Amino acid sequence: MLNGKNIIVTWDFTEMSDFAAAHAVKLVKHLQCNMRLLHIMKKESEREEAEPKLLEEARKINETYGILPSTCAITGDIFRSIGDYTSDSENDVNLVVMGTHGMRGMQKFTGSWALKVITSSTVPFIVVQDMPTDKKLTDVVFPLDFKAENKEKLVWAIYLAQYFTLKIHIFKEPIEDEYYLKKINSNLIFARKYLAKYGIEHEIHTAKTKGHYETQLIEFAHESEADLILVMTTKNIGIADYVFGASEQAIIANNAKVPIMCVNPRNDLMRSNFWS
């Protein structure tokens, strides 16, 4: 065992689970965490079949990567049970890695299933759509806007920088409105101050044109060969955000298949002494 913290891999016995496991392996080796496969069963009667299958998948991961995950199968609904499990402090979950196909079919109308799972938890999710590259985690794109929650993303950028040699690419929208421009510049100054304080290399980039910010963000990340995009989920997200499209949905389901780290707003971090 390592530091007792766990990186959870959501496991549904699909190719997406394999992708998530491969990304988790890259993380646990650096973050000094344990790895756990979490499977959600619809009915308790599935346990007799599910648990041996889950142990077999853990064995295969150990054969392939030299890391033996623990396993856990629980009954419930994926939209609630994953969040409940990962938010429970007794389970010592550091973050979750989840594979997704992006938005398909009816999800385009009812909202991203992945986002519904993500926002049910207090811990960050890394959402992946493909196998990882051999490249080390170095380049992280950091979208920056006028919202106060940008500060919470810095917590995780600084956390990752303790274990990886990171370069943070701050990417902002071209804004002319003086009110929002003042807020963005304030967040930018704050971000640069703390990144410099922790010795984290960073650059500032601005989208080329107004509008289609998410599209330009993905294009920038793809062209920069970014390893991760670090986003905040919408605060107090509701049904309307799922149906009409919270901005992070398009980023999570990006066609370039860039991994996305989603951080959910937490009042306890905003009230903490981290920024003192």
Image (cartoon, rainbow, N blue to C red):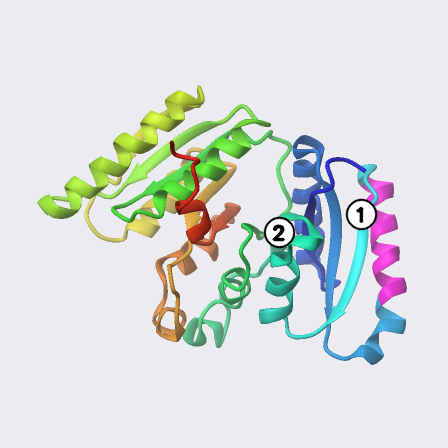
Q: Are marks 2 and 1 in contact (CB under 8 Å)?
A: no
Q: Say above or below: 212 vs 42.
A: above
Secondary structure beneath label 1: loop
Residue type pointed to by label 2: Val
Quadrant hosting residue 245:
bottom left
Q: Nearer the viewer, residue 117 or 207?
A: 117
Q: Which residues are drawn in magenta? A: 51-64
First of labels 2, 1 by sequence position: 1
Q: Say above or below: 16 vs 258.
A: below
Q: Is residue 91 left or right of residue 45?
A: left
Quadrant hosting residue 48:
bottom right
Residue 254 in view: no
Which residue is tagged 2?
Answer: 96
Which residue is tagged 1?
Answer: 69
Q: Say above or below: 262 vs 159.
A: below
Q: Residue 206 placed where, x, y %? A: 25, 36
Q: Main secondary structure of the magenta part?
A: helix
Q: Residue at x 82, y 41 (%)?
A: 64
Spatial CA span between label 2 and label 1: 14 Å
What is the residue that sits farthest to the top in this orientation?
A: 199
Quadrant of the frame with the C terminus: top left
Q: Residue at x 52, y 28 (%)?
A: 161
